[in-house]
Amino acid sequence: MEDVIVSLDEISEEEGQGLVKLARTAIEEYLKNGVEIDLEEVPYESWKKKGASFVTLEVSPTHQLRGCIGSVIPHQPLYKDVIHNAIAAATSDPRFLPVRPEELDNIKVKVSVLSYPQPLPYKDPYDLLNKITPFKDGLIIRYGNHQATFLPDVWEQIPDKTQFLSQLCLKAGLPADCWLTYPIEVYVYRTKTFSE
């Protein structure tokens, strides 16, 4: 796993802010010219490692969500993941119309880098509740072909653990009580978020 970002300590503030700039440039170039940018020279070693990222677009100053797309498992170099997810957040989030170039001045870009998801073993639903750390843990649930994730940011909207799990079940296309009734697999990760 030496070419995969395992710990978030590998990304400095400077590197993270660079990723935010990269995400914005990727969106601008794509919206104006239809081009997915690439870098001739990658400025940081950490960017060359495989990494998972989420790019979130918010309308400023209301913080309304305008797009959010990401990957949970690292499968390509971090900088490419950010470019790809930035463009997807602006153009392919099924909840929103594609961003128009004239909106860009009022959009704030956030990039979250994810640690490698770890399975969370639990005995029963109460044990699961006890093992989750609100505001720090991002969660992935999986059952059969169903899967969904909430970034740690989502705790700000849903601070209650039972509600958090119920909403995550619904997002996965499962009944809200799936975490109480199904043998779901749970994975946990942390994020480091950088924003404009």
Image (tube, rainbow, N blue to C red):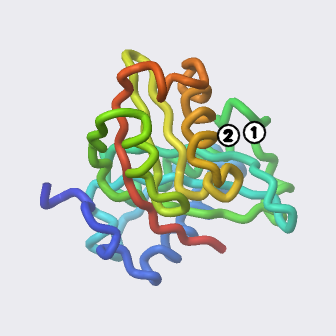
Tell which residue pokes out farthest to the left in this image: 2
Asked whether the viewer can see residue 29, the reply is no
- Residue 3: horizontal and vertical position, in percent? 18, 58
| Kind of residue indicated by mark 1 | Pro
Residue at 63 percent across and 40 percent down: it is 163
Tell me the residue that label 1 is attached to.
Answer: 98
In the displayed structure, would residue 195 be above or below residue 130? below
Amino acid type at image mark 2:
Thr
Q: Which mark is residue 16?
A: none
Where residue 31 appears, as percent x and y from the top left, is 70, 48
Q: CA distance from mark 2 to mark 1?
A: 4 Å
x 75%, y 48%: residue: 66
Mark 2, residues whose alpha carbon is within 10 Å: few (<14), some, or many (≥20)? some
* Quarter of the image with the N terminus in it: bottom left
The answer to whether residue 55 is seen in the rendering is yes
Mark 2 secondary-structure assignment: helix
Q: From the top left corner, tell me how far across and down residue 43 is, in percent.
A: 35, 76
Quadrant housing the C terminus: bottom right
